[in-house]
């Protein structure tokens, strides 16, 4: 259950003036422009991190907006190459139009994934709420069928279905699968998802084990110690780790700009000391860099989607030493 404090922070923040929300979100969003994202990445590259870039946007209502995302991601791709950044792309299939016009939406996604492939770059399909889980997985499978294997999905540990999804994806594409596993930001109904913190952690950890055992590439996206510590133990049990070739017999060959079968992923502005510690120990650590003109809408939507973020944001500001960027 979401606590009263969290609800209060969210209720207060969404009523605050735009400048205040901007001040709060400045830690989590690189800025409104692509140049802002490039600057942040250049700075954080000194810490040994690599990146994935997300162009912020709301649910689109016309295919013109999908065209905007396609063009903006082309600019992102060019900026990554021109600035020699170790980064890939994170896209939302809905922003490319798959729910409005499936054929054109798929064409848009194919264009950006194809362009990325020609530069040996990976594309992650972010996962939205349960209404688009099937579609998102299907987009990834369709791309693989077309030979565009530089694309992978996100699965959410909180959803009951995720272990079955891993099994069915493994049956279809084997170790060519490349996952991001996270708890899931969307507060899904009890009929389809775990809702208690410990259950969510346990379910997420089971997914991590299943993904590792399937031979897939696994990006563990969490700032939570029980998930990270479980991952470290799971890696050790499989003789996996930094600076070691991936020993799994069923693993795919090493991927360019990726870790040895796994990596850690964190959001910009969250738990920097932990990220730097993992990086120092030699683990590949990727930072999710959101930027865009829609930073205000994005911040408000995330707060409304998951009011527990309210507590984390408040904690980050009131007790900054517990969660430095
Ligand atoms: P938890 O929420 O328990 O956080 C652990 C600690 O980390 C908190 O106590 C706090 O200190 C800190 N923290 C976490 N989030 C914070 C925040 N926003 N502000 C301040 N402190 C914070 N979800 C999804 O549904 N689809 C997706 O595609 C993705 N993609 C994605 C990419 C990456 C790189 C990450 C790291 C996360 C996602 N997520 C996501 C979000 C994910 O599902 C989850 O909601 C958050 O990561 C928070 O869960 P944790 O495992 O970090 O634990």
Image (cartoon, rainbow, N blue to C red):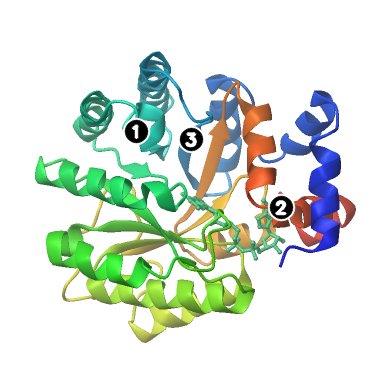
Q: Which residue is mark 2?
A: 307
Q: Which mark is residue 219?
A: none
Q: Is 105 left, or right, of 79 in this rendering?
A: left
> From mark 3 to mark 1, how far is it between C-alphas?
19 Å
| Residue 195 left/right relative to 168 | right
View extreme (left): residue: 146
CB under 8 Å between callouts 3 and 1? no
Q: Which percent across, then down, holds residue 220?
A: 45, 63
Of the image marks 2 and 1, the number of the one nearer the N terminus: 1
In the rendered image, residue 176, in percent from the top left (x then y), is placed at: 19, 57
The answer to whether residue 114 is above or below residue 69 is below
Secondary element at tag 3: strand
**Would residue 164 be visible to someone looking at this image?**
yes
- Dot 2 falls on a residue whose secondary structure is loop
Q: Which mark is residue 99?
A: 1
**Measured Cα–Cα span from mark 2 to mark 3:** 22 Å
- What residue appears at the point 71 percent right and 52 percent down from the top-left corner? 307
Q: Residue at x 41, y 81 (%)?
A: 234
Disc 2 vs disc 3: which is toward the camera? 2
Q: Is residue 29 left or right of residue 151?
A: right
Secondary structure under tag 1 reads: loop
- Tell me how far mark 2 sits from mark 1, CA to CA: 26 Å
């Amino acid at each position: 259950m979401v606590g009263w404090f969290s609800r209060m922070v969210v209720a207060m923040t969404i009523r605050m003036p735009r400048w205040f929300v901007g001040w709060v979100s400045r830690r989590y969003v690189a800025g409104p422009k692509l140049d802002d994202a490039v600057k942040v990445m250049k700075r954080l590259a000194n810490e040994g991190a690599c990146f994935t870039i997300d162009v912020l946007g709301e649910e689109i209502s016309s295919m013109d907006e999908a065209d905007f995302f396609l063009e903006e991601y082309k600019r992102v791709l060019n900026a990554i190459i021109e600035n020699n950044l170790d980064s890939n792309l994170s896209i939302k299939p809905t922003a490319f139009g798959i729910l409005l016009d499936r054929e054109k939406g798929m064409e848009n996604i194919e264009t950006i994934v194809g362009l990325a492939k020609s530069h040996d770059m990976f594309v992650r399909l972010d996962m939205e709420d349960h209404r688009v889980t099937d579609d998102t997985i299907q987009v990834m499978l369709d791309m693989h069928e077309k030979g565009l294997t530089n694309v992978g999905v996100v699965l959410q540990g909180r959803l009951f279905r995720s272990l079955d999804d891993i099994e069915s994806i493994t049956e279809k594409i084997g170790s060519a699968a490349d996952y991001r596993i996270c708890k899931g930001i969307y507060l899904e109904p009890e009929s389809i998802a775990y809702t208690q913190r410990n259950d969510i952690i346990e379910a997420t950890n089971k997914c991590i084990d299943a993904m590792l055992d399937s031979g897939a590439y696994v990006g563990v996206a969490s700032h939570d110690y029980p998930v990270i510590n479980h991952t470290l133990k799971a890696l050790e049990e499989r003789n996996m780790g930094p600076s070691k070739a991936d020993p799994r017999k069923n693993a795919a060959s090493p991927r360019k700009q990726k870790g040895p079968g796994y990596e850690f992923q964190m959001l910009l502005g969250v738990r920097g000391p932990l990220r730097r510690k993992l990086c120092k120990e030699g683990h590949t650590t990727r930072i999710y860099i959101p930027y865009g003109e829609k930073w205000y809408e994005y911040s408000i939507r995330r707060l409304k989607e998951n009011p527990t973020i309210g507590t984390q944001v408040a904690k980050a500001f009131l007790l900054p030493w517990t969660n430095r960027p």
